[in-house]
Amino acid sequence: MRLRQVHNSSLRSLRSSNPRITKSLDTHKHVSNEKHFNKPSLKTDSDIVKSNIAITNYMRIGQCDSAQRLFDSLSKRSSVTWNAMISGYLSNNRFELAHQMFDKMPERDLVSWNVMLSGYVKNGNLGAAKLLFDRMPERDIVSWNSLLSGYAQNGYVDEAKMIFERMPQKNSISWNGLLAAYVQNGRMEDARRLFDSKEDWAVVSWNCLMGGYVRKKRFIDARRIFDRMVVRDEVSWNTMISAHAQCGELMEAQKLFDASPKRDVFTWTAMVSGYLQNGMLDEAKKVFDEMPEKNSVSWNAMIAGYSQMKSMDMARALFDAMPCPNISSWNTMITGYAQNGDIAHARHLFNQMPHRDSISWAAMIAGYAQSAHSEEALSLFVDMKRDGERINRSTFTCVLSTCADIAALELGKQVHGRTFKAGFESGCFVGNALLAMYCKCGSIDEAYDVFEDMADKDVVSWNTILAGYARHGFGEKALSIFNSMKAAGVKPDEVTMVGVLSACSHTGLVDKGSDYFYSMTRDYGITANAKHYTCMIDLLGRAGRLNDAKNLMKNMPFEPDAATWGALLGASRIYGDTELGEKAAQMIFQMEPDNAGMYVLLSNLYAASGRWGDVGKMRLKMRDSGVKKVPGYSWIEAQNKIHTFSVGDALHPQRERIYSFLEELDLRMKKEGYVSSTKLVLHDVEEEEKEHMLRHHSEKLAVAFGILTIPAGRPIRVIKNLRVCADCHTAIKYISKIVGRVVILRDSHRFHHFSDGLCSCGDYW
């Protein structure tokens, strides 16, 4: 009796919440009168049919428990009843319950086996599907097609072909299943052979083959298929119009458009998109205005076209005129504003969105990251997690890149944990971002652990870890990675060789670097480009071989660029060659008159030579040219925040404590033999004033703050936007010994690992 009461209550709830199925439920007349409760259970076939309908309806609306209660209350069940339960559980992704029901079934018919087989296939469990298939007492064409479809949809094309060849009979589903498998996996030659082996293909099969050729950019083959078609539908015409538009044949696309016997909204949108893809905004807008009917895809295509052409006012006008903007419309606008540098408007729209998805959050986070608003990007990521939105691969990659930019290692580790839970860690896309994050945050050992754990490594993975070791100054380890890369059968590319030459440059391996440079065309088929020559000139210059560096530049097969001259200027500064430095600087000023860094390098060279008059002239030249020196900043992650320091910083809330600690450190360093490099101060002032100016450089403030706030035993990681000055480099060596701490400093050129009074660069930088 209790079961009947529960069942009646469930049906009443079902009727009130789902009027669409009330009629079908009413056909199952449940006893609601007390005098009927003592009647026998359902016995007739008619009653079983009604129960089966009710079970199916319960399952259709997701009320699995109600279906189970009704099933349990039945005294008589047919195979259809069991199959309705199994199918219902499968459609509601309750696979284990479906499996249990199948195992309990007293007698299974062919439908039962096929339903369970389909369930295994839909859940991607092909091994279990094959075992079940082999156990089946009988099979029909549905059984064979289910297994074939499972292999095909999961990319096991050869296995799908074997099933196809074993099939005792085939229908159009079988043929189309194998054809689609070939096309979806890019095996167009196999697809064409299969297609040519049969004549009576339906129009959907012709469209499938033609679409495959279009995706592979084989437009001539696609057009041949189109021309052979006896019957064409809207999909045929739309596919071919899009194909011609994609390859820039707008006149042919327009001819097909005009000849199309029936145009739907997709036909018109194909033309709009074609013009937009070729930068023909006016033509696209003309077609758009003529459209008899527009859908969200049409509007969004036009909005995206204006955004890509930086016409955000026109994009906004269309967005405001759109009858029913969907979430893609909002995302397109946000991305457009962000990519065009208008982050304020992007955030304003983001805040106004009625609903957001992962793409909305990713677009906004990427916008902040790309416009150098790193802290805002990370803050928004935290909000995204709090909001419960699912984080996709692109968001993880963007956030990891942002963590890398500002050396936010602790937050990067938290993000790493989330990527692991999401199952993204082992793939190349996120794995490479993790690699770069650990490398740029100064944790090269953890970067290598990620590299080792990656299930799939591509050339980017190898290049990232190689460049990481190079930038950290571990040249021999970088070259060992290079040898492992070749042994793994991964072909080095141009980026690889830049990393190899940089490793040699940062470590002073001149002979090895020269061997790699002159043999990379012969060994790897790589022609040296400007970056390779710049690395080689930097390598020779750092080693003091300035004449060799000049001769190499003279014999380059192309004109040197500003970066190449910059390498020569840097070497001139190290070895005090003012004449060569002046020549290099003049060439750079002609190419990049706004390059403030080169003015500073030349000023340093003049200051080191005591040529204060020339230092003053450089300042005047910068002022007259409107060039502003890039201010030096240093960052450190501590107390779950990013702390930023500038030279002589007076804004940090703990500035008095930091300055007091630096004064104490200065006295202790001098007792150990430290002497300030006052020649680096670009001002002709007293020595005492120069010492004071050097003492409060941003990297020293950041290091001092790190010592005061980061627990002992943990490295202090600092990042600087410019190159570390020689005085700070010397001072931090002393500090690391005095306080017994490891300091990892990343500047604009490389990493420096300070420990016990030494630096990993060996003072070769």
Image (cartoon, helix red, strand yellow):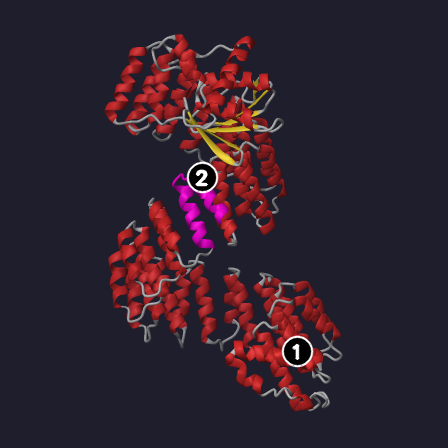
Looking at the image, residue 413 sits to the left or right of residue 310; the answer is: right
* Residue type, mark 1 in image: Val
Numbered label attached to residue 375 = 2
The residue stretch that appears in magenta:
358-383
Relative depth, front residue between 399 and 462: 399
* Residue 705 to residue 36: above or below: above
Quarter assignment of residue 168: bottom right
Viewer can see residue 208: yes
* Relative image position of residue 290 (x, y in whole percent): 25, 68
Q: Sequence order check: which comes first, mark 2 or mark 1? A: 1
Residue at image position (30%, 69%) is 257
Quarter assignment of residue 37: bottom right
Numbered label attached to residue 6 = 1
Q: Main secondary structure of the magenta part?
A: helix
Viewer can see residue 144: no
* Residue 210 to residue 456: above or below: below
Viewport quadrant of the N terminus: bottom right
Check if residue 370 falls in the magenta segment.
Answer: yes
